[in-house]
Amino acid sequence: MGHSVSEPGVSEPGLLAARVSTALDAAMAEPVRAFAGKLAQDAGALAVLFYGSNLRTGELEGVLDFYVLLPGPRESGIWPRVSYHEWDHDGRVLRAKVATMALATFAAAASGDLLDTTIWARFVQPCALAWSRDDTARAQVLDAITGAIVTAARLAVALGPDRGAPEDYWRALFRATYQAEFRVEKPGREDTILAANPVHFDGLLPVALDHAGIPFTRDDNVLSPAMPAAERGAIRRWWARRRRLGKPYNLVRLVRATTTFDGAARYAAWKVERHTGVKIALTPWRERHPLLATPGVLWRVWRERRRQRV
C-alpha cells in the first residue's frame, strides 16, 4: 500500500480557497440566479448563497434555499431572520425559504467565534454563490466558507477516531452537531449527507487539515491526524460549551421564528397542500396570526382527509 506524510504547508498554499472558489461557481439554473438577484436587490445585500437539495439536483420544484448576506456590523441577539417568498418568473411560480443576516455575523459564526453551530455545520456542505455585489463581497464570502470548513474539520478530528477514513471523521462531526440541535433527525442522517455529496467531500478533509496546519499521515484512504493533546482538549472544551447550549439556543431561535418568520402562513399553507392535497384559504387573519390559526387549519385538514376516505 502507498504511504505518504503531510506536514503543514506541504500542500499548495490556498488550495482549500481554490477548491471553495470552484464550488461557489457551481452551475445553477437561470431562474435561481434571477431569484437571488431579486432578493439581493430588495434587501440591499452584499451576496446571496444558494444551498440545499435543489442545488444538487438542479430542480426548481419545492422550496429553494437561500442565505442573503447584508452589509453592516455583527448582529446581536438571535439571527438569522427567516422569510418565505413566492415569485412568478416567466410564468412559473418559484418558492424560496430565505435566511437573512449580516455577512459579518455569518463570517464570525463560520469561524467558530460565536456559540452558533448551524453555520459552519451547514456550510461545510455544498453551497454556491448565486449573486454578489462585487469582487470584494465575493472574496469575503469565500473567506467565510473556507473558515466554516476549517472549523468543521478541526472539530471532526477532535471528535473522531485516532485514525480512519475521512468519512469516519465527517460522520463523527455531523452526528455530534445533530445531537446538539433542537430538531429530530433520523438515525444515519450523517450517512445521507455524505452519500448525497460524494464529489464535494472527496479529498476535502486532507486539504482542510493542511490549511488548518494539522499534520497527518495517510495510508491509502486512512488518515492519522497528529493533533496535539492540548489542542484536542481545547477544541473539545470549545465544543462542550456549544453542545450544552445548543438545544436551548435553537429552541429560542425556533420560538422567535414563530413571530418573525415573514410569510409563515403562506409557507405553511403550501406545505399542507403539497403533503395532504388539502388547499388552505389564506385569510388576512391567518396571515397575521399563523400560530393562532394552526388549530383551525389542522382541524380542517383532518376533516377533509376523513371526508375523502369515506
Image: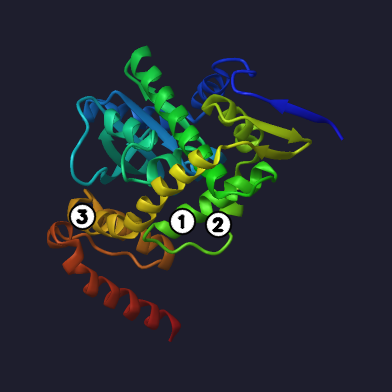
**Residue holding disc 1:** 178
Q: Is residue 26 visible?
A: no
Residue found at x 20% / y 28%: 73
> Which residue: 42% across, 35% down?
50
Give the residue pinned by disc 3. 256
- Per the model, the C-alpha gap separating discs 2 and 3 is 26 Å
Say if residue 201 shows up in the picture.
Answer: yes
Amino acid carrying mark 1 in the image: Tyr
Dots 2 and 1: beta carbons under 8 Å? yes
Between 116 and 69, the residue placed more toward the observer is 116
* Contact flag, marks 1 and 3 (Cβ < 8 Å): no
Of label 2 and label 3, which has the lower sequence position? 2
Q: Residue beneath label 2, please?
A: 189
Left or right, 2 with respect to 250, comes to: right
Dot 3 falls on a residue whose secondary structure is helix
- Residue 258: horizontal and vertical position, in percent? 22, 58
Label 3 environment density (alpha carbons within 10 Å; few <14, some 14–19, many ≥20): some
Q: Quadrant of the N terminus?
A: top right
Q: Between 236 and 27, which is closer to the camera in this rendering?
A: 236
Q: Secondary structure at mark 1?
A: helix
Viewport quadrant of the C terminus: bottom left
Give the x, y percent position of residue 186: 52, 64
Picture layout, residue 56 above or below residue 23: below
